Amino acid sequence: MSNLETFDVVVIGGGPAGATAANDLAKRGRSVCLLDRAGRIKPCGGAIPPQAMREFELPESVLANRVSSARMVAPSNREVDMPIEGGYVGLVDREHFDEWLRARAATSGATRVTGTFEKIERDTDGTAIVVYRPGQGRNGSPSEQVRARAVIGADGANSFVGKHYVPGYETVKYVSAYHEILRTPEGFDGNRCDVYYQGDISPDFYGWVFPHGDTISVGVGTAVPGFSLRAACTELIRRAGLADAEILRREGAPIPLEPLKCWDNGRDILLAGDAAGVVAPASGEGIYYAMAGGRLAADAVEEFLATGKAAALKNARKRFMKAHGKVFWVLGIMQRFWYSSDKRRERFVSLCADPDIQYLTWEAYMNKRLVKARPGAHLRIFFKDMAHLLGLVSPR
């Protein structure tokens, strides 16, 4: 058996999922190594709900902005405003937000390591050995190694950990996302998010204009091969009246379409966040679900370390799907139906003008639960949906 430094847990990836898992485990007294690449920023609108602020004890200082409404833009350019009564949508800049989460994990006791993950080997006693290249990964420095009683793969969509060490990972499906960060021009309305449901901006998803205070994230996503995300983003910037705004950076990455069927290797490796596929269909919301998945991964790994039973690792997925599986199922159906053509997108935006839909949408978003307190609203929405599905009402 080697004399390498041994950690209870090595977390590979320092985004919201990995940093949350590392923080939770370190606070429990576990020895944690948080391994993250330098300079990685995920393309993301940056929206987080009030529930994330409460659940993960986030201070107001992590927010770059708070918006009080959203504007839905239909293929016909019809605009529908959805004010948020008694709440808000928080916006973060991932460059600063992710770093704050990593720093918090270090303050809680996690050991931060900057480097590029390479592979997992096995010691003579079967313990995982995590091999990584320190620093920027481009300086020719030799690989280094640490032992891990457990490994959490939070290395994003297209996860290297998932591809090589978790069975069934090759079945994951992706949306390609791309955004440009612009400097906010003088006079821009930073109190709302704009969402464009237009087929030439995205044939199967949407485009977004999300204000982050001094900057704006303008982005698009699609699963359609060959669709030019960059050209669509340029057109979206023009439609949003931002053609003269300074572009500060451009970023692109895959986003998973649905949770994987299996998150662990049945031994000592568990996936979390985008690596596990926990991005909400239809909305593309990922930060809250990544953090929730990271916390559940930490719980499952803690149980595994305490009992030695690898079956405990499966609890992360079981608990996540119990809490959020129904919402993901509903959103998946909604995306497949309403985003499939401009005719349906037009009707979808029309539905967004309904007060009952606005109330239930914001309550579910802000508090991350299905609303049961107003059954009459659910019934009215059901009949309105049916009327639109059957074409019995005009989309205007």
Image (cartoon, helix red, strand yellow):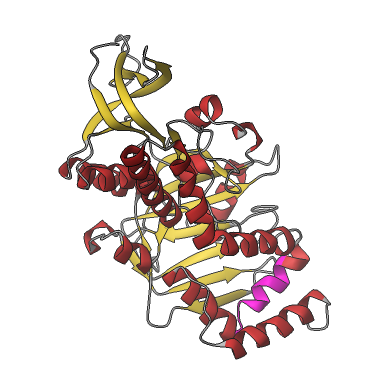
- The x and y percentages for residue 189 are 40, 69
In the rendered structure, the answer to whether residue 189 lies left or right of residue 342 reads: left
- The x and y percentages for residue 385 are 72, 78
- The x and y percentages for residue 389 are 79, 74
Please state, as top left, top right, bottom left or bottom right, where the C terminus lies in the image: bottom right
- Which residue is found at the position 38% from the left and 82% from the top? 86
Q: Quadrant of residue 5?
A: top left
- The x and y percentages for residue 291 are 38, 52
In the displayed orientation, state which residue is furthest to the bottom. 376
Please state, as top left, top right, bottom left or bottom right, where the N terminus lies in the image: top left
In the rendered structure, the answer to whether residue 230 lies left or right of residue 128 reads: right
The kind of secondary structure the magenta stretch mainly shows is helix
Q: Nearer the viewer, residue 12 or 61?
A: 12
Q: Nearer the viewer, residue 248 or 256?
A: 256
- Which residue is found at the position 48% from the left and 75% from the top? 362
Q: Quadrant of residue 269?
A: top left
Q: Is 390 one of the magenta-colored residues?
A: no
Q: Nearer the viewer, residue 295 or 74?
A: 295
Q: From the viewer's perspective, is residue 287 above or below residue 115?
A: below
In the rendered structure, the answer to whether residue 250 lies left or right of residue 94 reads: right
Q: From the viewer's perspective, is residue 4 above or below residue 26?
A: above
Q: Is residue 224 visible?
A: yes
Q: Is 350 one of the magenta-colored residues?
A: yes
Instruction: Please give the range of residues in magenta.
Output: 345-354
Question: Could you tell me how many numbered marks the image carries?
Answer: 0
Q: From the viewer's perspective, is residue 75 above or below residue 293?
A: below
Q: Is residue 238 visible?
A: no
- Which residue is found at the position 54% from the left and 31% from the top? 166
- Which residue is found at the position 61% from the left and 48% from the top? 257
Q: Nearer the viewer, residue 304 or 82?
A: 304
